[in-house]
Amino acid sequence: MGFWIIPLEADLKPLYLNVLAPVAHKHQSPSNNERQFLAQGARRKRFGKDNVILSDIRKPPDHIFHGGPFIYSDILDYKNLREIVVNNRITWLFHYSALLSAIGEANVSLARAVNITGLHNVLDVAAEHNLRLFVPSTIGAFGPTSPRNPTPDICIQRPRTIYGVSKVHAELMGEYYHYRYGLDFRCLRYPGIISADSQPGGGTTDYAVQIFHDAVKNGKFECNLKSSTRLPMMYIDDCLRATLEVMEAPAESLSMRTYNVNAMSFTPEDLAQELLKHIPEFQITYNVDSVRQAIADSWPMNFDDSNARKDWGWKHDFDLPELVTTMLNFHGSDTRVAQAN
Ligand SMILES: NC(=O)c1ccc[n+]([C@@H]2O[C@H](COP(=O)([O-])OP(=O)(O)OC[C@H]3O[C@@H](n4cnc5c(N)ncnc54)[C@H](O)[C@@H]3O)[C@@H](O)[C@H]2O)c1
Ligand SMILES: C[C@@H](O)[C@H](N)C(=O)O
């Protein structure tokens, strides 16, 4: 994902700098393609198709390109950001551009530029033009010295990845701009996000997306984390709804500017057991990637999101069984499921 720009009602113009999960899966059937369009369409439907501008530095899939305005935007180009905001009278900005945890460790200088310099550009353009700004943070903003089970909103944050460091920086800078300049900064710490219409983006939680592709296509999956690695996770629809809900919450209901949000928490073994109920021949093997495993072992196992639930009424819809059924349906596994039954 990157960044979104949106307009409000007649005059609310959101800009999304990259889209969470925009990439259509190559193997989907036409009917699944239509269903997968819904998550993206929801944002455009909520605000009006022409009022939501999506952007990236990468070519979008057909359904994104034809679904409403889409533009090229590099968050490292400040003048270009300012031009987009001015020319389109943007009011809300959703900033999704980032390098994720595992890929960030493989390319620290690029991660530092995109995740930190890019954030500075976004903060400045938002403050200069009085935008409401959403920036996602992550379970990766915590580290080995944070309480892991559960992890509360306020506790020690000493992450050991450039990704985590950049996200703590984003949380603190956003809050600083809020108190110093009155910027309407809002931030959610997402768990691992699972979506059928995306390819894994270089994160530590990628296995929980890839497993569905491989289970449906090949009936087997090689997992790069240990079977007992417990991490917080969330289905994409809950993630998008949480994001819009916190953005639309009255300012006086927000006791904080950065909130944990959660839905479920599982291990690769738990996920495999749930998949076996639908695909009895499914097999999982383990070939642990030491970089990803060390990252996962330093992250929360369970996330305490009680403040989000109390302040603005957060409530998730998808637990593990609903997640697996929905993902398998999206992946066109109806035939396998029918065979299994
Ligand atoms: N996916 C998850 O599980 C998860 C969990 C927690 C938080 N998040 C956050 O959500 C956001 C999106 O995550 P994602 O999974 O979609 O990641 P992703 O890797 O799939 O997408 C990142 C996007 O950033 C874009 N990008 C890279 N450099 C850019 C630049 N210079 N200018 C503009 N765009 C640029 C990429 O082209 C890509 O579209 C990130 O900020 C991430 O930290 C994601
Ligand atoms: C958890 C999250 O921030 C991302 N999916 C990663 O693993 O890097």
Image (spheres, grey):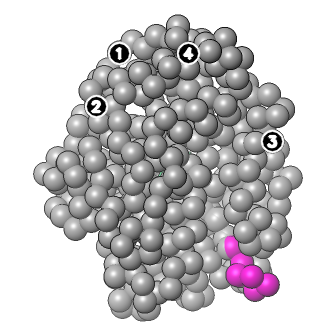
- Which residue lies under the disc numbered 3? 34
Local SS, label 1: loop
- Which residue lies under the disc numbered 4? 279
Indicate whether residue 8 is drawn in magenta.
Answer: yes
| Mark 3: few/some/many CA within 10 Å (<14, 14-19, 20+) | few
The label nearer to you, 4 versus 1, is 4
Local SS, label 3: helix
Q: Which mark is residue 229?
A: 2
C-alpha span from label 3 to label 1: 35 Å
The correct choice, above or below, for 233 with respect to 156 in the image is above
Residue 196 in view here: yes
| Mark 2: few/some/many CA within 10 Å (<14, 14-19, 20+) | some
| Mark 1: few/some/many CA within 10 Å (<14, 14-19, 20+) | few
The label nearer to you, 1 versus 2, is 2
Assign the C terminus to one quadrant of the image.
top right
The residue depicted at 83 percent of the width and 55 percent of the height is 67
Residue 63: image location, x then y, percent: 81, 47
C-alpha span from label 3 to label 2: 34 Å
Q: Are marks 2 and 4 in contact (CB under 8 Å)?
A: no
Q: Which sits earlier in the primary sequence, circle 4 or circle 3?
A: 3
Local SS, label 4: loop
Q: Are marks 4 and 3 in contact (CB under 8 Å)?
A: no
* Viewer-closest of 77 and 280: 280
Q: Which sits earlier in the primary sequence, circle 3 or circle 1?
A: 3
The residue depicted at 40 percent of the width and 59 percent of the height is 261
Residue 29: image location, x then y, percent: 80, 28
Q: Which sits earlier in the primary sequence, circle 4 or circle 1?
A: 4
